[in-house]
Image (tube, helix red, strand yellow):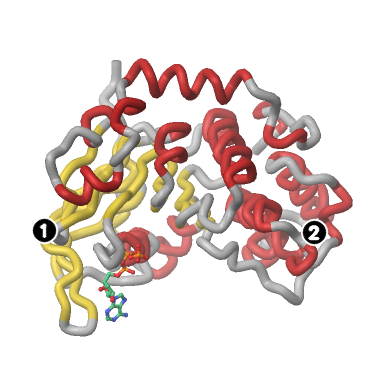
Amino acid sequence: MSAPEPIIEVDGVTTVLGGHVIHRDLDLTVYRGEVVALIGGSGSGKTTLLRLLLGLEVPQAGSVKIFGHPLGRCAARDLERVRYRWGVLFQNGALFSALNVFDNIALPLRELKSVPPDLVKPLVMLKLAQVGLKPDDAFKRPAELSGGMVKRVSLARALILDPQLLFLDEPTAGLDPDSAKQFVKLLRRLREELELTVVMVTHDVDTLFAVVDRVAVLADQHIIACGPLAEVARMPHSFVRNFFLGHLERCAEEDVKRFRLSLDDTSDEGGVPAVLRGEAVS
Ligand SMILES: Nc1ncnc2c1ncn2[C@@H]1O[C@H](COP(=O)(O)OP(=O)(O)OP(=O)(O)O)[C@@H](O)[C@H]1O
């Protein structure tokens, strides 16, 4: 078997914001095809780490490489090219309220001018179906959408350029439990179909159980552990103990597998229309 390919390599990073050290000597590697969750207490520096991975912050020391390109040290054109290989789902969706769903999803395509104008419509409608929305939803404004629909539209926009890497900031925050469950099931399916590598910040234990391969714990200014749920959940660190309080029995590998199977057994994501399968994508 060939060695796993690193997609994200964070090496010895120190980040200082407003005179405060947020990260010190932080390392993290994410391999192709993995779903890695970043957990940590409030103010531990998760969002800042996400911003480093997106090239929106520059570390004071250390390096961040995505797809082998060192952010901050590659030419602007190279950085642009790397950026189009990832998609981002922001916590609040970050949809433009003046644009309808169609135009929100089409925005990256139109900005990049990477496809002929007559292909924009079929591609947008394909992504809309992929995230379980109906064709009619394309003409709604963000204000007319439920929280779950906003997440789906934002996900469609994040996927419109067919990225290999997806960043999710609190993907289920603000959703009711049922919508959160349906959204996580959608992520599970898309991750398989599109062979995505995913990094997500989450506080939601059920999301970890449903979809995550490894959990990275950010505490004391660095990643104190990154491993399978069953392993990380048993760490003696106070943040980890509190995070998994009441959930520890569910963390055994067999129980996680059973939980995932039970999700697969239930109907598709909230009765949404059948979606186009992987072979129609790309
Ligand atoms: N631009 C900035 N200037 C100064 N300090 C900042 C800046 N951005 C964030 N911080 C500080 O950095 C620390 C980490 O913030 P960050 O938002 O990354 O934490 P977080 O783990 O995402 O927190 P939460 O879970 O509450 O969203 C906090 O103490 C915050 O106040």
Seen in the image, is 14 located left or right of residue 256?
Answer: left
Q: Using the rendered image of the protein, determine whether residue 197 is visible from the camera's viewpoint.
A: no
**Cα–Cα span, label 2 and label 1:** 46 Å
**Secondary structure type for disc 2:** helix
**Secondary structure type for disc 1:** strand
Direction bottom: furthest residue: 18
Name the image quarter holding residue 186: top right
User: Given the image, on which type of amino acid does mark 1 rest?
Assistant: Asp
Residues at circles 2 and 1 in contact by the CB criterion of under 8 Å:
no
Seen in the image, is 106 located left or right of residue 202?
Answer: right
Which of 24/247 is in front? 247
* For discs 2 and 1, the disc positioned in front in the rendered view: 1
Which of 142/156 is in front? 142
Q: Mark number for residue 117? A: 2
Q: Residue at x 27, y 64 (%)?
A: 45
Q: Position of residue 96 (x, y in %)?
A: 68, 72
Q: Residue at x 39, y 62 (%)?
A: 54
Q: Position of residue 175 (x, y in %)?
A: 59, 53
Which of 233/63 is in front? 233
Q: Residue at x 39, y 53 (%)?
A: 201
Residue carrying label 1: 25
Q: Residue at x 29, y 41 (%)?
A: 245
